[in-house]
Image (tube, rainbow, N blue to C red):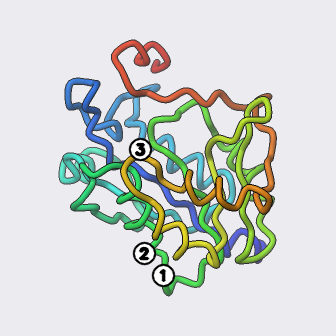
């Protein structure tokens, strides 16, 4: 394992309740015979993240019981209904004191983004001041890599469903964009119609 790999932790936001999916938690949606949360963890690991923190919320007990999250640090977000911002804050707080100098942040409901795109973004990590984002036809998307120097600032601005968006817009000049449109599809699983993407 290289130094760079050890310094970047995977941070998977998997707390969503699937409000527009009849209240089915996104982490447990099946894709290729496994829950989405397992696919996302496997992709982060294949991308070089030895440490993976998973933030759960909706039906967290069921997710823990049904998904294989061995070796992950699983963190519950009691405020998950407030939106993705609260899960990002919870996840970043869980990384404090671990020695991680960067967090590769991924969303559980984007199975079209796999290890190759994640590895490209992770490879952009230089030090704790790094800000790196996947781009699709030049438009910023996920995953994003947040250097540790930015965690407090991101947490202070992560509200509702915005996550790191406001912070990244404010620091746009410092964000390195990594084109991933050739290896990933950034769709979200938000509605019944989106379930067509799952196999």
Asked whether the beta carbons under mark 3 and mark 2 sit within 8 Å of each other, the answer is: no
In the displayed structure image, the side of residue 126 where residue 92 appears, left or right: left
Q: Nearer the viewer, residue 141 or 7?
A: 141
Q: Which residue is mark 3?
A: 37
Determine which of the numbered discs, if any, sits on residue 96 in the image: 1
Q: Can you say whether 109 is above or below 105 in the image?
A: above
Give the class, few, some or many, for how many residues have Cα within 10 Å of label 3's Cα (few <14, many ≥20).
many
Indicate the secondary structure of the residue bearing disc 1.
Answer: loop
Seen in the image, is 134 located left or right of residue 160? right
Residue 192 lies in quadrant: top left
The image position of residue 122, as x and y in percent, is 72, 58
Q: Quadrant of the N terminus?
A: bottom right
Q: Is residue 163 left or right of residue 175?
A: left
Residue 93's quadrant in the figure?
Answer: bottom left
* Residue that label 2 marks: 93
Q: Is residue 191 above or below residue 44?
A: above
Looking at the picture, tell me which residue is in the foreground, 41 or 131. Answer: 131
At horizontal 45% and vertical 13% (from top left) the residue drawn is 196
Residue that appears at 44% across and 44% down? 38
Secondary structure under the numbered disc 2 in the rendered image:
helix
- N-terminal of the pair, mark 3 or mark 1, is 3
Q: Residue at x 56, y 61 (%)?
A: 10
């Amino acid at each position: 394992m290289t130094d760079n790999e050890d310094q970047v932790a995977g941070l998977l936001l998997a707390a969503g309740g699937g409000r527009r999916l009849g209240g089915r938690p996104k982490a447990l949606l099946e894709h290729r015979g496994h829950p989405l949360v397992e696919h996302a963890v496997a992709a982060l690991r294949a991308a070089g993240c030895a440490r993976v923190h998973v933030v759960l919320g909706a039906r967290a007990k069921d997710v823990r019981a049904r998904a294989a999250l061995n070796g992950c640090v699983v963190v519950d977000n009691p405020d998950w209904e407030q939106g993705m911002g609260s899960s990002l804050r919870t996840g970043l707080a869980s990384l404090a004191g671990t020695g991680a100098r960067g967090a590769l942040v991924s969303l559980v409901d984007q199975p079209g983004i796999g290890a190759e795109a994640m590895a490209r973004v992770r490879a952009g990590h230089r030090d704790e001041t790094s800000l790196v984002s996947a781009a699709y036809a030049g438009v910023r998307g996920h995953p994003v890599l947040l250097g540790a120097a930015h965690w407090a600032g991101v947490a202070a601005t992560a509200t509702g469903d915005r996550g790191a968006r406001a912070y990244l817009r404010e620091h746009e000049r410092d964000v390195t964009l990594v084109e991933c449109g050739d290896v990933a599809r950034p769709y979200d699983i938000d509605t019944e119609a989106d379930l067509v993407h799952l196999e």
